[in-house]
Amino acid sequence: TKRLLAALALGAAIASTALLPPPAAAQTYKPEYKVSTVLGAPFPWGVSAQRWADLVKERSQGRINLKVYPGAQLVGGDQTKEFTAMRQGVIDMAVGSTINWSPQVAELNLFALPFLMPDHAAIDAITGGEAGKKLFDVVGAKDVVPLAWGENGFRELSNSKRDVRTPADLKGLKIRVVGSPLFNETFTALGANPTQMSWADAQPALSTGAVDGQENPLAVYVAAKLNTVGQKHLTLWGYVADPLIFAVSKPVWDTFSAEDQKLLRETALEAGAYSKQLARTGITETDPATLKAIEALGVTVIRLTPAEQKAFQDATKAVYDKWKARIGAPLVDAAEKAVAAR
Ligand code: X2X
């Protein structure tokens, strides 16, 4: 009977605690928050997303646990569906590319306007100024809370067929692109044959020769070893740059206390700064370590003269003008002004 009494007491205790609200200190946070990225470590993109997760864990004493899911695996590898999945709360958080979100957020095509940004200072002038703020407002109005800018980087052109110095050299080359139709139109204007596919599909397509070329930052070229899939001709043309956005799904954001929202924002800003630093290392003429490493692999690195670069700009001018209107002329004007004043 002692046992029976003990069992009854235990049962009563369980029943009563089940009715009690959880103690105020123990917030009802998820055991894990899924952070979507396309590229994982050792790519700068994945490394900086992991930095965010590490900083959050440390500063929250393990209360908030972010886990990075690379390869756009939370959306079956289809990186252009990431934004929609975040809006719906299927993905908690992301370190996402403006290119991959541009099918849903037309304004993010800004960074894909050919030759808008001549250097890193131009990217910073845009993201750190009025245009950057407007873009965050646009994203924020679509149930995604943007916290900080990061960087995938300037996208350089590689191919397996020949040196590309002029638009004529691009004629007939099959080039893999991703994102919005703006990319198709840019490469079509240059005489190439663009074909849209995810990063997951791009690598096999390059290795089988189904496509001849691609465009991606140099850090991506190196970490993905694109020289091993025949990409021996590399043109430094810096035609577009791709910032990253550290962001949280709005329904998820609303579950955090104000203090923890501040923690998430501050750590995202730090990880974003780290991301820019990683993306910009080794790729300039004053800091050429990555370029040297690529050349040492037997890759021909083509540096364009200003006149050669202008030929590409002229050939894509009509596409720029058309998309300026689509993106919104006031936003593009603000970006152009920021670049001019940098
Ligand atoms: O797919 C690409 O080219 C990549 C990895 O750079 C992006 O996600 C935009």
Image: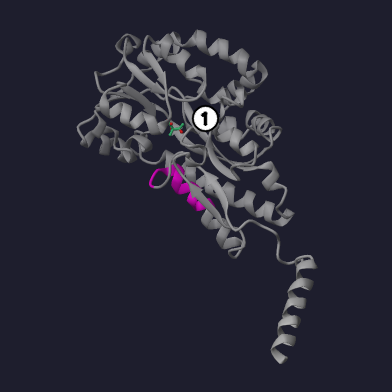
Residue 70 place in picture, x, y as percent: 46, 44
Residue 250 place in picture, x, y as percent: 69, 42
On screen, residue 309 versus residue 87, left or right, reads left
Quadrant where the C terminus sits is top right
Asked whether the viewer can see residue 114, the reply is no
Outermost residue on the front side: it is 1
Asked whether the viewer can see residue 11, the reply is yes
Q: Main secondary structure of the magenta part?
A: helix
Q: Nearer the viewer, residue 135 or 38?
A: 38
Identify which residue is drawn at 50% across, 25% down.
179
Q: Which of 282 and 137 is in front in this view?
A: 137
If the picture is divided into quarters, which one holds ligand 1?
top left
User: Where is residue 239, by image quadrant?
Assistant: top left
Task: Say if 311 sits above or below 299 in the image.
Answer: above
* Residue type at tag 1: Thr
- Tell me the SS state at disc 1: helix
Q: Which of 80 and 11 is in front in this view?
A: 11
Quadrant where the N terminus sits is bottom right
Is label 1 within 8 A of ligand 1 (CB to nearest ligand atom)? no
Is 63 a magenta residue? Answer: no
Task: Say if 233 sits above or below 319 in the image.
Answer: below
Residue 76 place in picture, x, y as percent: 48, 37
Q: Nearer the viewer, residue 76 or 233?
A: 76
Residue to which mark 1 is pinned: 80
The magenta stretch is 42-52
Residue 339 place in picture, x, y as percent: 56, 25
Identify which residue is drawn at 51% across, 37% down.
75
On screen, residue 136 versus residue 165, left or right, reads right
Identify which residue is drawn at 54% across, 32% down.
81
